[in-house]
Image (tube, helix red, strand yellow):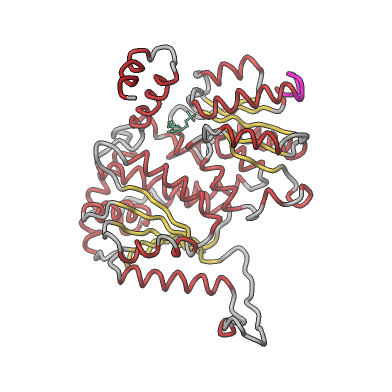
């Protein structure tokens, strides 16, 4: 059976260098699996694909079916790990123009992500387009106190109660949050919303397979069983201790070797626009996990061939502090043939009979050789096809590699203390009670 594979033959590294990393990878593996490393209270994601609450999973499927039947527009309110995984899955796996398909064709609601910014324009425009439509909301927040989704939800909740009355609104609002603490938990209990639980030991960026991802993904009509199956197989395969037999650990080790050689930026590359949000999700996973204590690879991403016409020059010829990791989907979901044109005014007849994916793959190989010739190490993750199963496996691949890579780097991959700084300043500037002293300090700087 085909499988996800990892090719580092264009990394400028030799096999013996991987061998040299064997011990350090093994140490990281032990820390992770024996739960002895920093952040050990946040390792619930490792076994989640086998340990998940099966009863809750059934409730998710039931809620998703109800939403698919009674909703025109499903609003997913959340930020960071509380929306990126679901968005990545829906964009990678559904039709490229999902929201524009007729309701009959997609047999479910439009899905719109909200609460991931503080733009009044975005929310106002959203409220204009949902007017007259049947709405359901999934508010997702582990802490239950994050400002962006909380503001959006306050406004949307009032809109729903005004539109449907409190009783019906309550039946159309689903909350995904902590089992016992946080403002959202309290509010949900008081209002009587159906709730789904984000386990204590799973951080936001590792939560795709929890209800955080599963409810919106199921509402999109995707097969969440198959996705979990992919994650489950990934869990099994990527717990192999021997680096030579574990492509996930090879990726974790090699990115650290390259980092130690001055390659401080990793650029995740795709050749399918539908993978854009996988990159956004990946950026949070690695950025929040590794960017701390004055170190860490900066995770960046490009969509090719689009960005070859904007970032291609830099990648080919700019500062040599980067490496690329390419997501190569071996079998495109759809393809289209390039037709013959008798007049050939565009000089494209040399491609007649070829398909667009054929051209895309040549663009990939051509770019790979060019960038390698330009001294950019290239790592390739081959994915047989983009379906629910391989999506689940790929997400698990990156999560596991991230835990290992963070331990190799010597950081706690499971906290994000740096994110608090902007929040404190913002709260002080907004006059939130408890921030008076900082407010005075910041006022002097304005
Ligand atoms: O689910 P929550 O608690 O609203 O957090 C959303 C996101 O905000 C962060 O906590 C950073 O502020 C991320 O780690 C998290 O994914």
Quick one: quadrant of the C terminus? top left
Q: Which residues are magenta?
A: 163-169
Residue at 37% in and 12% down: 436
Above-or-below relation of 379 to 411: below
Task: Say whether residue 327 is left or right of residue 53.
Answer: left
Along the line of sight, the residue nearer the viewer: 113 or 51: 113
Horizontal and vertical percent position of residue 357: 56, 70
Q: Closer to the camera, 443 or 56?
A: 443
* 165 inside magenta stretch: yes
Report the residue at 57% width, 83% height from top. Answer: 347
Could you tell me residue 290's position as x and y percent? Answer: 32, 41
- Quarter holding ligand 1: top left
Choose top left, top right, bottom left or bottom right for residue 137: top right
- Magenta stretch holds residue 354: no
Front in this rendered view, residue 123 or 361:
123
Task: Spot the residue most to the bottom.
Answer: 342
Question: In the rendering, at what x and y percent does residue 207 appear?
Answer: 49, 37
Is the residue 154 above or below the residue 365 in the image? Answer: above
Indicate whether 164 appears above or below 130: above
């Amino acid at each position: 059976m085909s499988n996800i594979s990892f090719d580092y033959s264009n990394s400028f590294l030799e096999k013996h260098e991987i061998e040299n990393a064997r011990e350090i990878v093994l140490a990281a593996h032990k820390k992770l699996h024996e739960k002895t490393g920093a952040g050990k209270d946040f390792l619930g994601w490792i076994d989640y694909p086998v340990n998940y609450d099966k009863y809750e999973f059934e409730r998710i499927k039931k809620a998703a079916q109800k939403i698919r039947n009674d909703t025109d527009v499903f609003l997913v309110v959340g930020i960071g790990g509380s929306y990126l995984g679901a968005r990545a899955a829906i964009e990678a796996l559904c039709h490229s123009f999902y929201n524009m398909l007729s309701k009959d064709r997609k047999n479910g609601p439009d899905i719109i992500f909200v609460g991931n910014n503080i733009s009044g324009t975005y929310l106002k425009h959203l409220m204009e387009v949902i007017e007259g439509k049947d709405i359901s909301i999934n508010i997702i927040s582990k802490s239950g106190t994050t400002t962006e989704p909380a503001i959006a939800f306050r406004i949307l909740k009032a809109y729903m109660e005004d539109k449907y009355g409190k009783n019906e609104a309550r039946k159309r609002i689903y909350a995904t949050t902590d089992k016992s603490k946080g403002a959202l938990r309290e509010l949900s209990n008081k209002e009587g919303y159906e709730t789904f639980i984000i386990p204590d030991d799973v951080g936001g960026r590792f939560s795709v397979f929890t209800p955080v991802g599963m409810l919106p993904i199921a509402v999109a009509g995707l097969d969440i069983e198959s996705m979990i199956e992919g994650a489950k197989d990934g869990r099994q395969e990527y717990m192999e201790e021997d680096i030579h037999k574990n492509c996930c650990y090879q990726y974790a080790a090699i990115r650290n070797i390259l980092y130690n050689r001055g390659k401080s930026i990793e650029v995740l590359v795709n050749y399918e626009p539908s993978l854009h949000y996988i990159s956004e999700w990946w950026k949070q996973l690695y950025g929040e996990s590794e960017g701390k204590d004055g170190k860490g690879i900066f995770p960046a991403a490009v969509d090719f061939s689009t960005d070859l016409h904007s970032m291609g020059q830099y990648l080919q010829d700019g500062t040599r502090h980067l490496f690329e990791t390419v997501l190569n989907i071996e079998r495109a979901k759809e393809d289209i043939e390039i037709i013959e044109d008798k007049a050939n005014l565009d000089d494209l007849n040399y491609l007649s009979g070829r398909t667009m994916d054929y051209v895309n793959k040549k663009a990939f190989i051509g770019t790979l050789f060019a960038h390698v010739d330009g001294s950019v190490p290239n790592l390739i993750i081959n994915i047989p096809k983009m379906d629910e199963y391989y999506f689940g496996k790929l997400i698990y691949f990156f999560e596991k590699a991230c835990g290992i890579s963070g331990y190799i780097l010597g950081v706690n991959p499971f906290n994000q203390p740096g994110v608090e700084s902007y929040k404190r300043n913002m709260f002080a500037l907004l006059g939130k009670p408890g921030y008076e002293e900082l407010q005075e300090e910041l006022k002097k700087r304005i």
